[in-house]
Image (spheres, rainbow, N blue to C red):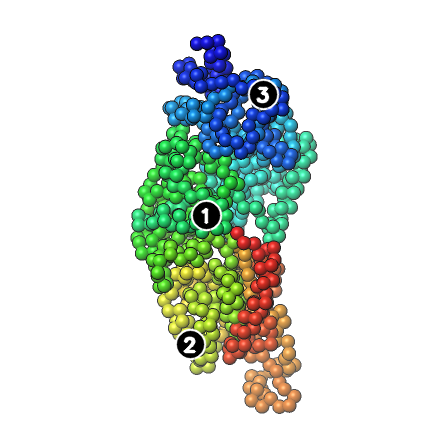
């Protein structure tokens, strides 16, 4: 061995990870190594360069930064430090710039000569992976700390990093629990956290997701217990700081407290609906729900539709092996060092793609379980005509004892040319705890686009308010939306708004809705349905028969367009969302004016017209759909204001007489059905005004004040008013910055 080779060998043996390898293994690198010298200020490599070499610093000092304005310091590299090692696991181009701070000398090894270290054996691969993963997360932390504390020099960066400790959360692990006292704050470096709040009577509700930044600082500032539970939606890396460190860091770095204030202002603006976070990379796993699922075809078509909105990467097991140039990575068992390559690569993709679609295997496998562990969201994909029973892997997703609280969807695939409404969805939903389900024909681009819009949080969600006959204006609005090319992705309705919305969700065109509802409501026959008014003035039979004629045996969950309606549970004084069950019965509950129709009994509770608690369900829709919410209101703020003063008491016989013989002076008294309907609307309006303004992105109030609540004969005029009003408003909305396409 020559003098130069002995020098190379000595330097390798003094530099981790080579210092931990057997001598024979170190000797194998010597022939491929060569010396590189840099003058002060000379660059070793820049962001975007090919990652063809690994460098070991022998002499001098170098600086590594992320190019920005100003540059973000990552580290200073001295003797026995590595440069360029991150790409050993993640592959791809360089992401940082390394420049010599003084004259330096480095040892250069071709990447092809060191790649095999991650495959050589468990010991070698484990050592290399540990070093690279430590460097990868340290680099990401440095970028985040620069945003929080401002520009830091090498000493300050080390000072802040030394104050924290690394924490790894597995999927479903809790970081903080609602009601517990604060122990400190954390900085999220990688992964995804969920924030859930548990009310006094009910399960936890996911209120937000955290992809980066500080968590837990509010409880330190206020001294109060945590107001929410924070947990890992997917595997996450954090740095935890003690409570005392919060104030110490605040004194040392004033920019830290400024960032805390800025962060909380941003949270407040998001809560008020004034701003939204910029989209980050979302990892979505596609899990076959049955053996017949054409998962590869579905994934390919979904990726194609998503790519028309944003950058998308679709990977299966073979794809990740090819991308990492590491056969066997996807199917490596959890204890294998190869498993480190996939999460390392995943962490390096943040901001590169809007979506990463992970296509799982049809059967249980290490790759399938890895997909689930690293997902922000899971989509189970089944064939509608197949067996609805979940397989072993899918069943574990819904086991409340072990399943992570990660958002889940169900997609049911139907024949391409099918015009028949879906059936049997209830059997699929009964066995799965999913947040939402979708019916998709692979041959229908609109079905796939609707799913893509939900995933990109750009769905158009329509909330239709109640208002008696005035609800016919919704027909015209729906016609205007269709003509303007506005795809309606989800509909919610109350009372008459529910009936109109359900018809459209069934696929009935607005032109046909006019004739359908003319027949339905003008020939309702309530006068002949009157009964002894112990519970209500009518039996409800005539209205039920009309609903059954239109909606038949259709189930809520079997509609192509997702739909729900709202009723008022007066037994428990709360509004109820009807997302599943027999459609006509849900509509009967939502539109059953109290007093006029008997309440609908559901599980022993009494349900009446949804107008009582939520006449315009924009707030409810916002909690279900994260896209843009359009609220259409057919209830005037002032109504029934021109009445004859009939004194403190009045006889019904007198009212009847004056209606038959009004005389010259006129006699205006509102009918009992109108009073009952308006009373419900007025209560809801008083309680909902601010919520509607806050939760609806776009609001349209129809100018229908001059038409009576019960004037069902005015359907043509009302539909035209709705059409013209919406037609005039849509261009104004589309010109607004808030009408954001994905």
Residue at image location 56% in from the left, 89% down from the top: 660
Q: Which mark is residue 270?
A: none
For marks 3 and 2 on the same chain, the one whose residue lies earlier in the sequence: 3
Mark nearest the camera among 2 and 1 is 1
x then y, percent, for residue 102: 62, 20
Calculate the distance from the C-alpha at mark 2 to the C-alpha at mark 1.
42 Å
Asked which secondary structure carries label 1, the reply is loop
> Which residue does the image show at 57% across and 47% down from the upper left?
277
Please name which of the two marks, 3 or 2, marks the residue nearer to the observer. Answer: 3
Q: Secondary structure at mark 3?
A: strand
Residue nearest the observer in this picture, 27 or 363: 27
Residue 695 in the image, given as x and y percentages of width and height = 58, 57
Residue under the image location 42 percent in, 76 percent down? 542
Give whichever of discs 2 and 1 has the lower sequence position: 1
Q: Which residue is mark 1?
A: 407
How many other residues sit within 10 Å of disc 3, few (<14), some (14-19) or many (≥20)?
Answer: some
Query: Which residue position holds label 2?
Result: 542
Residue 86 position, x and y percent, is: 49, 29
Q: Is residue 713 left or right of residue 40?
A: left
Image: 699 above or below 121? below
Which residue is identified by label 3?
38
The residue tagged with tag 2: helix, strand or loop? helix
Q: Is residue 261 above or below residue 99?
A: below
Residues 672 and 164: in front is: 164
For the N terminus, the image quarter is top left
């Amino acid at each position: 061995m020559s003098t130069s080779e002995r020098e190379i060998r000595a330097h390798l043996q003094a530099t981790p990870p080579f210092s931990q390898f057997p001598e024979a293994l170190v000797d194998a690198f010597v022939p491929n190594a060569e010396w590189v010298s840099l003058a002060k200020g000379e660059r070793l490599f820049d962001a975007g360069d090919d990652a063809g070499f690994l460098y070991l610093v022998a002499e001098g000092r170098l600086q590594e930064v992320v190019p920005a304005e100003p540059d973000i310091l990552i580290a200073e590299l001295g003797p026995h430090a590595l440069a360029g090692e991150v790409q050993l696991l993640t592959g791809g181009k360089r992401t940082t710039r390394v420049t010599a701070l003084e004259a330096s000398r480095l040892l250069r090894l071709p990447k092809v000569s060191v790649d095999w270290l991650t495959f050589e054996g468990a010991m070698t691969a484990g050592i290399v992976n540990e070093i690279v993963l430590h460097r990868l997360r340290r680099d990401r932390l440095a970028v985040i700390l620069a945003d929080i504390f401002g520009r830091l020099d090498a000493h300050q960066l080390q000072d802040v990093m030394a104050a924290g400790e690394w924490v790894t959360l597995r999927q479903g692990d809790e970081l903080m629990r609602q009601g517990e006292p604060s122990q400190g704050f954390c900085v999220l470096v990688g992964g995804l956290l969920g924030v859930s709040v548990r009310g006094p009577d009910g399960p936890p509700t996911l209120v937000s997701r955290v992809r980066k930044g500080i968590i837990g600082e509010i409880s330190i500032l206020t001294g109060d217990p945590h107001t929410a539970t924070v947990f890992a939606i997917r595997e996450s890396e954090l740095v935890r700081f003690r409570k005392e460190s919060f104030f110490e860091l605040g004194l040392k770095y004033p920019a830290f407290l400024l960032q805390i204030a800025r962060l909380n202002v941003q949270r407040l603006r998001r809560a008020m609906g004034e701003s939204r976070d910029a989209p980050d990379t979302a990892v979505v796993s596609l899990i076959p729900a049955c053996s017949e699922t054409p998962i590869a075809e579905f994934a390919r078509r979904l990726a194609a539709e998503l790519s028309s909105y944003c950058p998308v990467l679709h990977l299966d097991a073979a794809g990740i092996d090819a991308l990492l140039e590491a056969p066997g990575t996807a199917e490596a068992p959890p204890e294998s060092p190869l498993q480190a390559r996939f999460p390392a690569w995943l962490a390096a993709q943040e901001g590169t793609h809007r979506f990463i679609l992970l296509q799982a295997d049809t059967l249980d496998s290490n790759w399938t379980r890895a997909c689930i562990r690293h997902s922000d969201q899971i989509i189970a994909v089944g064939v509608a005509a197949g067996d609805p029973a979940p397989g072993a892997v899918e069943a574990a997703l819904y086991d409340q004892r072990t399943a992570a609280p990660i958002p889940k969807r169900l997609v049911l695939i139907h024949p391409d040319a099918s015009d028949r409404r879906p059936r049997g969805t209830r059997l699929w939903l009964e066995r799965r705890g999913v947040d939402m389900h979708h019916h998709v024909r692979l041959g229908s681009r609109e079905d796939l686009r609707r799913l893509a819009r939900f995933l990109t949080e750009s769905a158009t969600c329509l909330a239709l308010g109640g208002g008696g006959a005035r609800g016919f204006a919704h027909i015209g609005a729906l016609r205007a939306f269709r003509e303007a090319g506005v795809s309606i992705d989800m509909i919610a309705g109350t009372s008459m708004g529910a009936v109109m919305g359900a018809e459209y969700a069934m696929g009935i065109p607005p032109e046909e809705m006019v004739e359908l509802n003319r027949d339905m409501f003008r020939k309702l026959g309530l006068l002949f349905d009157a009964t002894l008014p112990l519970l209500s003035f009518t039996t409800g039979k005539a209205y039920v028969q009309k609903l059954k004629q239109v909606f038949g045996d259709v189930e809520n969950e079997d509609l192509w367009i997702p739909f729900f309606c709202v009723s008022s549970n007066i037994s428990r004084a709360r509004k109820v969302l009807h997302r599943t069950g027999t459609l006509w019965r849900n509509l009967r509950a939502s539109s059953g004016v109290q007093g006029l129709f008997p309440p609908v009994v559901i599980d022993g509770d009494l349900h009446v017209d949804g107008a009582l608690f939520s006449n315009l369900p924009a707030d409810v829709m916002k909690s279900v759909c994260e896209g843009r919410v359009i609220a259409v209101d057919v209830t005037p703020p002032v109504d029934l204001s021109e009445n004859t003063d009939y004194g403190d008491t009045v006889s019904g016989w007198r009212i009847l007489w004056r209606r038959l013989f009004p005389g010259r002076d006129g006699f205006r008294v509102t009918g009992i059905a109108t009073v009952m309907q308006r009373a419900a609307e007025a209560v809801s309006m008083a309680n909902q005004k601010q919520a509607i303004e806050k939760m609806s992105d776009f609001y349209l109030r129809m100018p229908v004040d001059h038409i009576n609540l019960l004037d069902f004969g005015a359907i043509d005029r009302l539909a035209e008013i709705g059409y013209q009003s919406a037609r005039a408003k849509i261009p104004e909305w589309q010109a607004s910055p808030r009408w954001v396409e994905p």
